[in-house]
Image (tube, coloured by chain):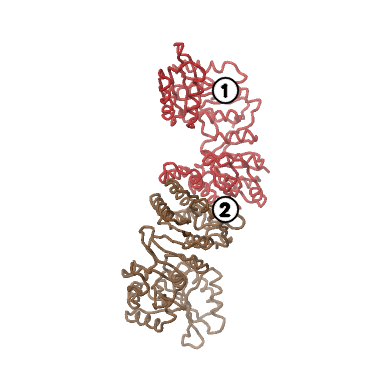
Chain colours: A brown, B red
Amino acid sequence: MAIIVQKYGGTSVADTERIKAVAKRVIETRNGGHDVVVVLSAMAGETDKLIQLAHQVAKKPDPREQDVLLATGEQVTISLFSIAVKDMGHEAQSLLGHQARIYTDRSYGRARISEIRTEPIWHNLYKGCIPVIAGFQGLDERGNITTLGRGGSDTTAVAVAAALGADVCEIYTDVAGVYTTDPSMYHKARKLQRISYDEMLEMASMGAKVLHIRSVEFAKKYNVPVHVRSSFVDEPGTLVVKEEKSMEEVMVSGVAYSKSDARITLAGLPDVPGVAARIFTEVAKEGIVVDMIIQGSSGDTDLANLSFTVPRPDCQAAIQILERMKAEWKDLEITSDENIAKISIIGVGMRHHAGVASLMFQTLANENINIHMISTSEIKISCVIDDRQTAKAVQVLHEAFELEKPLHHEIPE
Amino acid sequence: MAIIVQKYGGTSVADTERIKAVAKRVIETRNGGHDVVVVLSAMAGETDKLIQLAHQVAKKPDPREQDVLLATGEQVTISLFSIAVKDMGHEAQSLLGHQARIYTDRSYGRARISEIRTEPIWHNLYKGCIPVIAGFQGLDERGNITTLGRGGSDTTAVAVAAALGADVCEIYTDVAGVYTTDPSMYHKARKLQRISYDEMLEMASMGAKVLHIRSVEFAKKYNVPVHVRSSFVDEPGTLVVKEEKSMEEVMVSGVAYSKSDARITLAGLPDVPGVAARIFTEVAKEGIVVDMIIQGSSGDTDLANLSFTVPRPDCQAAIQILERMKAEWKDLEITSDENIAKISIIGVGMRHHAGVASLMFQTLANENINIHMISTSEIKISCVIDDRQTAKAVQVLHEAFELEKPLHHEIPE
C-alpha cells in the first residue's frame, strides 16, 4: 500500500462533469489499495477571471487582498470535488491552505512554502478519508492568505508529497507526459518514459510548460518521484526522477523553445571596467530579469558592444532605463528585437559526449538559421535565432539528435 | 466619534462599479470622523450560482463541503472591496470568518454564532484600518467553515455590532427602509422612521423581506440599534429600536403578507384525545414546520376537523405522511389548498387599543374577502385568505388603519 499524491490541473477540473470523472479516478486508485491525497487547481480560466475583476477595481490591486480573491478559485474546486466523492459513497474532506497548515513566507502572489504541518492530512488518512487540498494557497505566520504564483498547485502537490514522504506525486494535466519537443511544433515528438530532475528543470525554464519550475526544484531537493500524466487517458506518462546511469547513454533528451524574450543591443559603450555592472544594476532595480548576456568589442578600441535578453513585456521598460544613460555615455546606441526565439537542446548525457554543441550549430547552419546569441550550462545549449525560423529549427535538431527513436533502456509500451 | 457597523447586501455589491461606489460611501463615513466596520454579502445571484454548481455534482451535496463552497461568495466581495478602498488611498483589511474569529456551532448551512473574538477587529480599528468582514460565514471550534443560512450577513453585522458595542448597525439594501406595507403591492405605502424590534420580528416572520429574522432577534437581545437604509440614495431609512412610549400611540404600524404557505384540511378524524399530537409529531419528524392550526368539531359527534398551514414546498410531503394514517383512521379525508395568502396587521399599540381585530375583520368582510383561518399574537393579527384577494386586502387594511398618514412623533423629512 503506497501513499500517492495526485494533483489535477485546471483543465482536469474545468467543469462539474470533469470533476466527477476525476473523483471516479481517485476512488479507483483508492480501491486499488492505495492512500490518496488530492491537490486541485482552480477551474481552467477562473484565476484569470478573478484577476480581471481585481483590475476592474484598481490598476494595481493590493497584493494581500488579491491573494484573498484568487484563493477562492481552488476553494470552489476542492469543495465540489469533495461533494462528488462523498456522493459516490466514499469519505473526503476539503482542506484550505490554512486548514492543511501550509505555511509560507509573506510574499503575496509569489509566496514560498516554508513548512507543512501535516497533522490534519494524517488525521484524515487515518480515518480513511481522502484529504482534498487546495493548491496554490497557504498562510503566513500571522494567518494571512498567500498564493504561490502561476503553476503554484504543482508546488503544493510536490511539497505535500515531500512532507508526507509519499511514494509518488502524480501531476495530471492535459498532455500525456513530457515530450522530446512540443508535439504541436513537430509531429514526431516522442513521449519520454523517464527524465531527470535537472533535465526537467532546464526544459521548464526553457519554455516547456508541463511542470512549474519551482515544483521541480522542490522534487529534486526532497527526491520526490513525480509522474506527469494525462487525466484524459489511462496510460503511464513521464516519470521525473533522480538521474540514473542509463540516462547518460543519450546525448540529448529534448529540444525546447521559448518565444517570450526580446533582445536589446547596446553599441558605443565606453570600454572601461564597471559599465556592465552599472547597466545591470539599474535594470535589476526595476525588477527586470536579464537572461542571456554577450559582451564584445566593437573593433573601435575605446567602445564596446553588449547584447542581452529580457522578458518581452519588460523590453520597453528596460529601454527607457537605458535611454537615461545617454546623458552620460554620448555614443550609446540602443536597438532591440522582439522577434527572437530561444531554442535549446537538453540532456544529462551531454556531459559525457563530445561534439554536441558543434552538431547543433552545424545543423542550424545547414538550414541557413543564423545564431544571434549562445549560452550553455552543463546539460543544456541555448541559441537565440529569428522567431520565424523556430519550427524549422525544432524539426532539424530533433532529427539530428535522433529524438524520435525510442531509447535502449525504454520499455516498449 | 461613533463606531458604525455598515452591512451591504448583494445588490449593493452586485458588480465592480457598485463595489467602488460603496467604497466611496464608507470612506465618506470615515472622513466624517467615525470608525467604520464593514460587513459584506456575496454579489447578487452568486450564492444561487454556487448552489447550482453543487447540485450539478450531487443531488444532496455534503453540508460541510457546500459551506466551503458558498463561503467563496463573500470572500470575493470583501477582497475586491478592500482593493477598492486601498486604491482610494485608505487602509482596509479583509477578514474571513475564521480571521475575524466568528465562532459558530456545527450546524452547516444554518449555523448560529456563539462567540466573536474581537481582537482582530479592534486591532485593525486601532491601526486606523477599516475591517472588512465576510458576512454569512464563521468557523466551528474545530476550524471547519460554516455558513449561517439565507440572510446570514445581516446576522453577522448585528452580532459584530453587539460584540463591539457599536453605536449603530446600518443595513444597506435595495429598498429605502421598512414600509407600512410592500410598496410594490400598494403605492400609498409609507416609509416608517422608527419601528420596534418586536414589530420588526413580526413583519419579518410575516414575509417582509427587509431584514433577516435572526438578525432582529440578535439586535433585540443585545439592544443594537439597526438602521435599515438604501445604498442607492443618501437619505435616512428606518431605525429598528427598543420599544418607545410614542410607538404605542398608533394601533397598527404595518400590513404584511405572505404567499409562501399552503393549507391542509383533515376531516373525519376520531374525536378522541391525542389525535392532534399524533399528527403533528409525524409531520415534525420530517422537519416540516406547521404555522397556524385550527381544530373544530364537525357536527358529527364522533369526528373532528383540523386545518393547518405548512410552507408551500412541504405541502405534498406532509400529505404523503398523512395518507399513511388512513390505515388507522378509516374516515380520514385530506384536502389541501395552495392558493392561499396570509395577511397580517402588526403594531405594539394593539396592546392598548380595543377593537383592532374587529376593524380588521369588518374591513375584509366589506370587500367580500373570506377569512379561512385566524391567528393572533400580542402585537399581530393574521388571517388566511384566498391568494387572489391579497392586493385588495393590503389596500383596504392600509386605508382602514390610516397607515398613509405620518405619525405624530415623526419628524417630517
Q: CA distance from mark 1 to mark 2?
A: 50 Å
The image quarter containing residue A328 is bottom right
Q: Residues within 10 Å of mark 1 (few under 14, many from 20)?
A: few
Which residue matches tag 1? B377
Q: Is residue A148 left or right of residue B316?
A: right
Amino acid at circle 1: Ser
Q: Earlier in the sequence, mark 1 or mark 2?
A: 2
Question: In which quadrant is the C terminus of chain B drawn?
Answer: top right
Q: Secondary structure at mark 1?
A: strand
**Does A249 appear above or below B254?**
below
Q: Nearer the viewer, residue B245 or A210?
A: A210
Residue A150, visible in the rendered structure: no
> Label 1 marks which chain's residue?
B
| Depth order, front residue of B252/A95 | A95
Residue B405: quarter of image: top right
Q: Position of residue A227 (x, y in %)?
A: 43, 64
Q: Amino acid at mark 2?
A: Met
Closest to the camera, between mark 1 and mark 2, is 1
Which one is in front, A303 or B245?
B245
Tell me the residue that label 2 is attached to: B88
Helix, strand, or loop for circle 2?
Answer: loop
